[in-house]
Amino acid sequence: MTERIELGTTVTVLPCRNPLLTARVAANIDRFSDGRLILGGGAGRAEREFEALGVPFGERGAITDEYPTATHRLWERREASFSGEYISFRDVAAAPRPVREPHPPIWVGGSSRAAIRRAVRHGTAWHPVFPTLDWLPVLRATPEQDQRTLEALAEHVLDLAAEAPRQQPR
């Protein structure tokens, strides 16, 4: 019915999902939507969810740092290999491939310094949770920021900042 509306996942809790499955499901959704998927991903904060899934809550940041690289590898090659601390695979047939090249946009969620760093390193955009005005210096101070424009990374956040200030949830 539409050819312009994009489909986004808000924030998928990456450490709770194997990158092989994430890559395959996201690529399928990207194909179904004719290349209009935006994959949101973050570290998560629901400790009981991690416990129920057997994922070490205290290592969620390190896992979240590693998984996007593995997912990108799967999207960029017909057969992919990756060796990391939390996930390793060899010669995996990575099909289907996403419509968008090299992959769907990834909006990294969260408002911590680590989330901002992840957005700069691994994401197409930063998708904050209740952003405050102190995020801009942190974003600018991230070393990798030199390679990208602030507007490209935080376009939708800058749009929100231009609107009238609103109360933060308590």
Image (tube, rainbow, N blue to C red):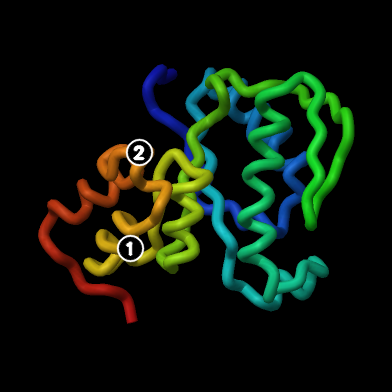
Q: Which residue is mark 2?
A: 148
Q: Quadrant of the N terminus?
A: top left
Q: Which residue is mark 1?
A: 138
Please indicate whether residue 130 sits to the left or right of residue 61 in the image: left
Disc 2, SS: loop
Q: Quadrant of the C terminus?
A: bottom left
| Residue in the foreground of this view, choosing between 78 and 147 | 147
Tell me where residue 61 appears, x and y as whole percent.
61, 65
From the viewer's perspective, is residue 166 above or below residue 143?
A: below
Mark carried by residue 101: none
| Residue in the foreground of this view, choosing between 82 and 100 | 82
- Residue at the image point whose x is 63% and y is 57% from the top: 64
- Residue at the image point whose x is 54% and y is 20% from the top: 101
Tell me where residue 83 appears, x and y as whole percent.
81, 44
The residue most toward the left is 164
Tell me where residue 122 appears, x and y as whole percent.
53, 44
- How many marks on residues? 2
Q: What is the spatial separation of the Cα atoms under label 1 and label 2, in whole angstroms?
A: 14 Å
Give the quarter of the image for residue 99: top right
Which class describes the residues within 10 Å of circle 2: few (<14), some (14-19), or many (20+)? few
Disc 1, SS: helix
Please indicate whether residue 93 sits to the left or right of residue 131 in the image: right
Please indicate whether residue 165 sits to the left or right of residue 82 in the image: left
